[in-house]
Amino acid sequence: MTTDPRDIIRRPILTEKALSLQEKFNQYVFEVSRRATKKAVKHAVETVFGVEVESVQIINMKPKPRRTRSRRRMGRTRHWKKAVVKLKEGQSISEVQGG
């Protein structure tokens, strides 16, 4: 995959669970491109943030049913891909720190 690293990483995920992973295990959670691989995510995080990555886990988030404005119709959320990136000891990403 020879694309720009900024096309692979879409946005950081800053939920309570993701922030607790940052504090306890030095892991950061990102929404990534659906075509991204573990190697591509590792390279993108190392390039964009200038850190060393220890491991990458990728999770495919499946669409879930949701109600639309009309109570009779059901819609679906979108399909997306999530990456949990573990950094080496002593490394951190200051741009992704939660409030």
Image: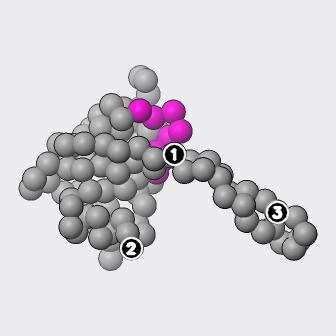
Q: What is the CA distance from the residue labelled 2 to the residue labelled 1?
A: 20 Å
Q: Residue at x 32, y 76 (%)?
A: 99
Q: What amino acid is found at the position of numbered circle 3 in the picture? A: Met
Q: Position of residue 83 (x, y in %)?
A: 40, 48
Q: Nearer the viewer, mark 2 or mark 1?
A: 1
Q: Name the kind of residue labelled 1 in the image.
A: Asn
Say which amino acid is labelled 2.
Glu
Depth check, front residue: 16 or 3: 16
Q: Earlier in the sequence, mark 2 or mark 3?
A: 2
The numbered mark at residue 74 is 3
Residue 22 location (% of width, % of height): 26, 64
In the drawing, what numbered circle is on residue 16?
A: 2
Q: Check disc 1 and report its element: helix, strand or loop.
A: strand
Q: Assess disc 2: are there few (<14), some (14-19) or many (≥20) residues with their C-alpha within 10 Å of its C-alpha.
A: few
Mark with earlier residue (3, 1): 1
Q: Which part of the image, by quadrant, shows the N terminus? A: top left
On the image, which quarter does residue 65 sit in? bottom right
Distance Cα–Cα, label 2 vs label 3: 28 Å
* Residue 76 position by quadrant: bottom right
> What residue range appears in magenta?
31-37
Residue at the spot 37% in from the left edge and 56% down from the top edge: 29
In this rendering, would 72 be left or right of 30?
Answer: right
Above or below 47: residue 68:
below
Asked whether residue 90 is drawn in magenta, I would say: no
Horizontal and vertical percent for residue 7? 46, 38
Q: What residue does disc 1 label?
A: 60
